[in-house]
Structure formats: C-alpha cells, structure tokens
Amino acid sequence: MIHASAIVSDRASIADDVEIGPFTIIGDDVEISNGTRVDSHVVINGPTVIGKDNHIYQFASIGDDPQDKKYAGEPTKLKIGDRNTIREFCTVSRGTTQDNGETVIGDDNWIMAYVHIAHDCMIGSKTIMANNATLAGHVHVGDWAIFGGFSGVHQFCRIGAHSFIGMYAGVNRDVPAYTTASGSPAIPRGINSEGLKRRGFDTEQIRNIKDAYRLVYRRGMKLAEATDEIADRSKTQPELELFLESLRSSERGLIR
C-alpha cells in the first residue's frame, strides 16, 4: 500500500492498510491509523498523530514546524482525528510551548484547497473550510462552523459552533455560536438559520436562538445584562447553552 518512491521513516508507525502515494515523505514520529489515504507529494512531519479513514490530497504539508519566531525546536504535536478530508496544498502546523503544545483537528472536517491552519489551533468536528481560508495561531473553532473562501481569522479568536464566516471576511474578534459574520473587519449579520435547519433544529429552537441574539446585538443591553438574561432562559431552552458559552468564554471581545 506504500508506493516504491515514497520515503517513510523507520520511526513512523503506519497501519497496514494505509495508502501512501508516490514521492510522499513521512517523517519521524508520525502515526497514521487504519483506512487513511495519503496521496502523492505530501509531506508529513512529526510528532503527528493521524486517525482513521482520512484522505490527504497531493502537495499538502502536515505537521511541520509552527510559523512562530519563538519556536526553538521544542517537541510539539499535531493531532488529527478520523474521516477528515484535507485537499491540495493545505498547510497544518504543530503547536508551540506558548500554548498547550499541540494543534488539534477533530473528526469529519472538510478542509478545501490552500487552507492554512496555524500552530495551536483547536478545530472541532464537522467543520467546512473553503479554499484559502486562513486561521492564525491559537484560534479555537467549534463544531459545524463554516468558513467561506479567502476568509481569515486573527490569532486567539474563537469561532463558535454552527457559525458561518462569509467569503473574504476578516475576523479580528470572537464570533458567538450560531452567528453569521461577514465583512472586513467582520460584523454580525444574524444567525445561521439555514444551517441550523439542515442540522435538525426545529422552529422553536431557532426562534429562541434569534431572540437571544437580539438581546446581545439589537436591544441595546449591556453584554453582562444580556448574558444574565440568556443564562436564565437557557434553563428551559438548552439550545442557548452554546451561545451562552461563547459569551462567557470570550477573551478578545465579540464582533460588533
């Protein structure tokens, strides 16, 4: 299953059914689990752990040194879960010791061509990143988030679950869960109603999320007041918990 022209380190751990294409290089301390396919001309360096049933397309660079001037060769890590698609020319860096020392990508993500995921990013599951989306270091992304083509996110920002980042958006503050954002700098445009419908949220749940969004962005309330009100509503409206967590965990401040 390994092409004769591929170079695989003796210190790599490769499951028996992994496919590795021609001219691909697998470095030291790389672990690749069952069912994963790595196409031609891919470079994977370690320490990197890649789960099951992933597909990494040609010319991707996975697990190389972080693009951080402070990095001095420390043994940091990249972890990739299961069933991810990583398309052509994507770059994913390992972590740094200035954070948790690892970059993490969850399961079932669809990562299109030329996407860059920088050091120490924490990516959830079932996200979509369109061509040329770029995440700076230390960005956290919740499950089901979608990034339009050529969108960019500033370092340390948090992108909430089920959010939608529009094409060419420049995000320099945190985006709450469920929120649609576009523009540069990105501003809130409402909630991702269509995405929520596709994922099984019913009419009442979507209405509750819209009302919570209005408390933050339309009613002129102070953020602390809106957060308290949403916390009270979340006791009977559990769909608000993700939105509430976004408000409480924000460190860079919310997009406005």
Image (cartoon, rainbow, N blue to C red):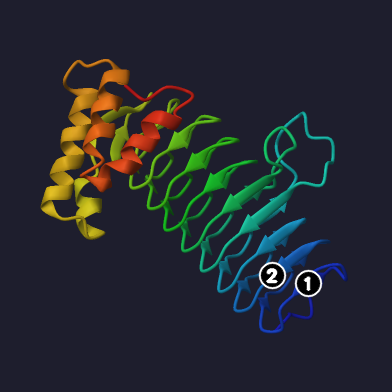
The residue closer to the viewer here, 225 or 144, is 225
Q: Compared to 121, does 62 lie above or below?
A: below
Residue that sits furthest to the right in the current view: 10
User: The disc labelled 1 sits on which kind of residue?
Assistant: Ser
Q: State the CA–CA distance, disc 1 to disc 2.
A: 6 Å
Quarter-of-image position of residue 121: top right
The residue where tag 1 is placed is 13
Answer few, some or many: residues within 10 Å of disc 1's Cα (few below 14, many 20 plus, some between 14 and 19). Answer: some
Q: Label 2, on which residue?
A: 32
Type of the residue with mark 2:
Ile
User: Residue 133: horizontal and vertical position, in percent?
Assistant: 47, 43
* Residue 14 visible from this viewpoint: yes
Do the residues under discs 1 and 2 have CB atoms within 8 angstroms? yes
- Residue toward you, 81 or 57: 81
User: What residue lies at 55% left-to-right and 67% top-to-bottom?
Assistant: 82
Q: Is residue 99 left or right of residue 149?
A: right
* Residue 73 placement: quadrant: top right
Mark 1 vs 2, N-terminal side: 1
| Residue 219: percent from left, percent from top | 16, 20
Please identify the quadrant where the N terminus is shown.
bottom right
